[in-house]
Image (tube, coloured by chain):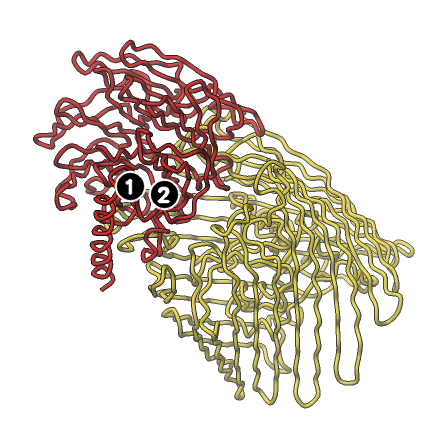
Chain colours: A yellow, B red
Amino acid sequence: MRKFFTITVLILAIPAMHLAAQELPPALKLAPLPSASGDTISREKLRTETGIADVIRSFSGVQIKDFGGLGGLKTVNVRSMGSEYTGVFIDGLQVGNAQNMQVDLGRFSTDGLDAVILYNAQKDGRLQSAKEYASGAAVYLVSATPSFEEGKVRNMSARVRSGAFGTFEPTIEYERKLSDKNSLRLIGDYLYADGRYHFRKFDSTMVRQNTDLRSFRAEGSFYHRGSSYWNLRAWYYDSERGLPGPVIRRLKVTTADRQMDKDAFLQGKWSKRYGDLGNWGSEGSAAGKYSFYYTRYRTDPFKDPGALPIDNTYRQHNAYGTYSHLLSNGKYSIGLAQDAEFSYLDANLRDFAWPKRLSTWNAVSFAVADERFSMSLNLLYTFAADWFSNNKGGFKKESEIRSFFTPSLTFGFSPDAHWTLSGFLKKTCRMPSFNDLYYTLVGNSSLEPEKAWQFDLGAVRRDNLGEVLSEGKIDAYFYMVSDKIVAVPTSNQFRWSMYNIGQTRIFGIEPTWKLSGSAAVEWGFLFKYTFQRAMDFTDRESITWKGQIPYIPKHAGTISMNVSWRGWRTDAVWMVTGRRWSSSANLTDYEIDAWNTLDLRFSKAVRNITFRLNVNNITNTHYEIVMNYPMPGANVIASIDYSF
Amino acid sequence: MKKQTLLIFSCALALVVLGCDKDETSSFTSEDETLAGETVTAGDKDARYVKLFVLNEGSYGQNNSTLDFFRYSDGKYVRNSFSQMNPTISAGLGDVGNDIAIRGDEAWIVVNNSGLVEIVSAKNEKHIATIEVPTPRNIVFDNEYAYVTSWAGAYYGGDARKGAVYRIGLADKTVKDSVNVGYQPEGITLSGGNLYVANSGGVNPGGYENTISIISQAGFKVTGAIALPSQKNLKDVVVSGGSLWVSSLGDYYSVHSGLARINLATKQVNEYDDVRVGTCLWNDAANDKIYVIGTQDEWVWTPGAKKTYSIYMANTASGDISEQSLPEGITYPYSIAVDGSSGDIFIGDAADGKTPGSIRCYDATYSLKWKATAGLFPGHFAFYDARL
């Protein structure tokens, strides 16, 4: 696998270096496609947050499923489709996880990022990989190309973060200008935290146990910006954490479960402007990625008197490659993309299936765009072949092929300088994960892909009121998810199985109002509200019929403000989430209380030192996002950033 | 401080209850009569039993096991009685109730993932005592001790951990000692001075178990084992009609679930391979009968496939098995109990496992008498008879 990747990278790198020397026409001029413009969080705001999860939760229509504390799993679910529908892309390449199709946001940091962008439906960049059309929603982590002040060839910064949860986190970032076209960034980060925090449950105040987290993260990125553009990126994450488990009735807390992770990826992306053919210009892009995940989960019966000895390891390999090509005359464009990926999961479980999957994605997109009107039609064909071990766990087949065709249409219209109307309709399918299909005693190898239809209409009004910019936006959407993969108990006690039985219909409205000013004092104000009615349409006879699906609030909103003045910056974020239920049976027994938190951020830059103070949940609200997994109360994290 | 208050409160309550008993000997009264309940049928003051307890397992990790009961005198079904009668125990009954057994006026409830055996008054569900037992599964009594199977036996390292039987003194309600048995023991019963323990090996890396451990009651030592020839992953054990009856779940792909009869005198084993097991065994001791619900379609994993369930009844005197199809309207049969005196049959329906289950009561001819909404996974029944 590693060899395969090395070869891929070389294949990509050689023509890139070769072509870089030639003189070619300037970049393709394309009118923007306002229809699928993403919701962007910029660099300044990113710097005020300590993790990606804290950034993403302020997007409209987003639920972060957070198991609490520093080490608790954090996944993102956009517009109630399920976290498997949300693709997370790092510099345009997806963080793939064939095992459970979920990305733990807790592992990624905001360091070195230029922006975090949420696209409902998909990014509409025209020159993009086929997989970028495949998610129901996409979160892009966009890294910044290093920039250097006049006469400088090197940037360095060191930061120490400390405070609540026994956190100690030193970080070092090094950027180097190798030539006018080439630059390099290296980031190293170490985190240790005991993770302990107080919470209230069962009428008493307790301390969360077995919550320690230790992690080490190293990143290296290489950027080339000439007549072609390419970057290479290597990433490594190594961590060990305690798993505190749910808070349940126990006389003593003896939980001692541990999880160890080693994640690594190496990715390269290249794009190139080719020569023109009459009015038509063309551009090509290729990318490759190899990723490896190692997870070990173990219990400790010596420390936990009730535990059975479990020591499970999972090893996952993914190798991915893509080539895409765009032809455009400025107004009309045609894009073609071809992707392929191979995934393999190895585990030391009894009766494991050792699944392998070869997937391909083919996409064609047609776009027309001028200053006023734009439209793009995208056709995606997905194919996946699985191979797995037969004869154990009730599997009847040795291989399985799944394929589907998913179109999408996006459009935008700007009648004047103030208004933009946009919308999309899209079909998305989500492949069953290896866990859905092959998890020993639970998996069901005959699952079909889940299907979703997404319809969205939105309007934006922008006004320039002297020194104040105003942007009001409203989006309404209707999503339908069918053949949802759901765990259902079987006729055998102890054994659950996965079935394609769920049906969900989601209707939502998301008004947003943004104001910003940049006179003597720079300031911003943001109001976001999300109404979501996510109904379970699975079984007309059941009490769950038309019930709000688990963990989705009907009402959620954010008000945030920021003020910057002479090196000072203050941010305040007030988040409100309405009541939710842990089951589609919306009974009081399953109700999870509404909550709201107020977070404050202060920073002050004095020459090349920046002091930051993050005061989270200042009102010390006790709340749960996932039932029986309490969230931390008030906490303070401080950091000092020194650049030289 | 809290415990003391609770103790004083409990004592005061006991006095009240005693007082009531003296005043009205004809009809049983208790504080839990004030609890709101659903009237599901007409009251019957002359019924054989006072109550039928229903233990809802709840979902693993959600801390939502609950105790319901059906009261014969007023025909009411009362949900979540433990929490209602013990508001000071705000954590409730705990996580995954796995067994309930009545001893005198006490109900002993085994709460698996909380690692507790809860003792409550069968009269009014007031908390009496809590005993810690790691990963407990099932319970049985003799005159001196309660015996609880547990997945957590002595551990000396390695990738497997033997199960154990914990012995709890009835007088002081404390754990006395334990003895190691096979992997992941489930059901336990006693007969003729011996305890019989069904070993499952349900999560054992070495594979499923097919043995029953024998423990002498006198010495509390393992004295032997009985192995089944082909059935494995053993679940419940019941002594009836002079034989030991064992249910098993199989391995889910090559060995089906089943029922076996072991002659305790000759140790001869007879496996009934046609019986399917999806619930706990119910022992109708008065009539020498054993009941269990299962389906021949237990390996059908096709989405949306309808499964045909049967109620299997073993006549333990003759050794014959009869099969009766499950009445209509039950989604996921999860438990069965039979009132041997009236012939009434109670079936717990776990529905889809995410929404509240239900209890249905049928007469001996399987015509529906009443139905009540229960909690999540209504899995275990126990009759309370005040005249015991």
User: Eyeballing the image, is A9 above or below A218?
Assistant: above
Q: Amino acid at mark 1?
A: Ile
Instruction: Answer with the quarter of the image where residue B203 lies.
Output: top left
Q: Position of residue A427 (x, y in %)?
A: 72, 44
Q: Which residue occupies the foreground of this view, A562 or B213? A: B213
Q: Position of residue A412 (x, y in %)?
A: 82, 59
The answer, for residue A34, to whether it is visible in the render is yes
> Can you tell which mark lies on residue B109?
1
User: Upstream in the sequence, badge 1 or badge 2?
Assistant: 2
Q: Residue at x 28, y 41 (%)?
A: B109
Do tag 1 and tag 2 residues touch (Cβ < 8 Å)? yes
> Can you tell which mark lies on residue B67?
2
Callout count: 2
Discs 1 and 2 share one subunit: yes
Asked if residue A351 lies left or right of residue A88, the reply is left
Q: Which residue occupies the foreground of this view, B220 or A381? A: B220
Label 1: chain letter: B
Asked if residue B24 lies left or right of residue A141, the reply is left
Asked if residue A32 lies left or right of residue A155, the reply is right
Badge 1 density bin: few <14, some 14–19, many ≥20, Cα 10 Å: many
Label 2: chain letter: B
